Image (cartoon, helix red, strand yellow):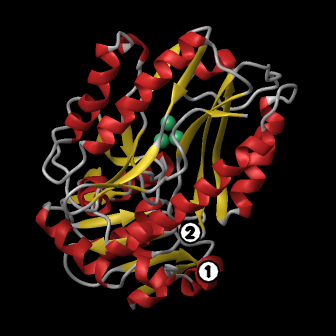
Amino acid sequence: MAVTSSDLYPVSRLAAVQEATAKAGIDALLLTPGPDLRYVSGYDAKPLERLTCLVVPASGEAYMLVPRLELPAAEASPASRLGLEFVAWDETDDPYRIAADRLGRVATVGLADRMWAMSSLRFRDVLPDTRQVLAGGVLRELRMRKSAVEVAALREAGEAIDAVHRQVPEFLRAGRTEREVGRDIAEAILAAGHATVDFVIVASGPNGASPHHDVSDRVIQAGEPVVVDIGGQLHNGYCSDSTRNYCVGEPPAEYAAYFEVLRRAQEAACAAVRPGVTCESIDAAAREVITEAGYGEYFIHRTGHGIGIETHEEPYIVAGNAEAMEPGFAFSVEPGIYLPGRHGARIEDIVVCGENEGERLNLTPRELVIV
Ligand code: ZN
Ligand code: ZN
Ligand code: ZN
């Protein structure tokens, strides 16, 4: 099923956001370019020094301040379907003053989590008696619960990145650098239908022990395991993220031993997903298997992160997060084992909580792929 932007950014969302804003005791949300603005309006506005800001009052009409030269772009975006007023400002206007005059006396505003400090401080200047909080407090609750259409968009993203992982064996061989392999992977990510390449990790040998390694000029050697963690944003605005492990020839024996532990840990965490269980219990399900096998100190990060219109968003699958799973929660399950100076491995799938169990959106084999 191909997902369209009017399905993904339904007009009804604005009313839901206003209701949640009122409930949170916030007078208005001020949403500058970034994921929060995109979530509410579908407008993927350029982040610029000139202010674009969707003002969502708890009650009353929402409107969007836009620089006059950006007006055609705003009107052409899905935001135009919301029937809101576009307030175009000219080069010599002060858009913050315009916003303050229209808002009047307000006790609390919610700023987009990714608003630049430049803008938040200007809003503080023009609204000196107004308390500023994060809009994310309101929006996280909505963004965390994916609709069926959003899940379909993530499924599409999963299929696209799976197609890239299937091609990785063609790119990987001894004598090539991580960077060369990474370049081929980046091309494949775009060819598979992504609009952007967000990250390409090709971590060979000892680099595999650094979870957020990028690529380097290191030449891949025979007998080395390689961690490949890749993702991008699809044209539908939703993100992909999947990690698989490859080895150029036969892996070292100690690697093969812990890889099997990791595979069981990742399986256990995926199997633990169902409505009502806490996020931290899914982390624990993976961690227990790894700890029991004696590798606990080498699993140095949380088990996963939520994913949607951003690669990392709520909910986080981490000890201390007692949030209960609900259908529509979408997140990564990506335990890893990292032996400093030697090698490492991580297996990552995106999982969506369904009515009864989790559904994995990444389906390529999780076993070590020997190339
Ligand atoms: Zn990560
Ligand atoms: Zn990843
Ligand atoms: Zn991830």
The residue most toward the right is 175
Q: Amino acid at mark 2?
A: Ala
Can residue 255 be seen here?
yes
Picture residue at 44% right of the left edge, 90% below the top:
81
The residue tagged with tag 1: helix, strand or loop? helix
Task: Please say if the residues under marks 1 and 2 sit with CB atoms less than 8 Å apart.
Answer: yes
Location of mark 1 (residue)? 73
Q: Residues within 10 Å of mark 1 (few under 14, many from 20)?
A: some
Label 2, ligand 3: CB separation under 8 Å: no
Residue 347 percent across, percent down from the top left: 49, 35
- The label shown at residue 8 is none
Can residue 49 be seen here?
no
Residue 278 percent across, percent down from the top left: 17, 42
Picture residue at 78% right of the left edge, 54% below the top:
187
Residue 265 percent across, percent down from the top left: 35, 30
Label 1, ligand 3: CB separation under 8 Å: no
Closer to us: 82 or 216: 216
Determine the image quadrant of residue 105: bottom left
- Left or right, 138 with respect to 80, comes to left
Marked residue nearer the N-terminal end (1 or 2): 2
Location of mark 2 (residue)? 45
Residue 308 percent across, percent down from the top left: 42, 58
The residue tagged with tag 2: helix, strand or loop? loop
Picture residue at 53% right of the left edge, 36% below the top:
367
Q: Quadrant of the C terminus?
A: top right
In the displayed structure, would residue 46 be above or below residue 125? below
Determine the image quadrant of residue 25: bottom left
In the displayed structure, would residue 27 be above or below residue 183? below
In the displayed structure, would residue 79 be above or below residue 145? below
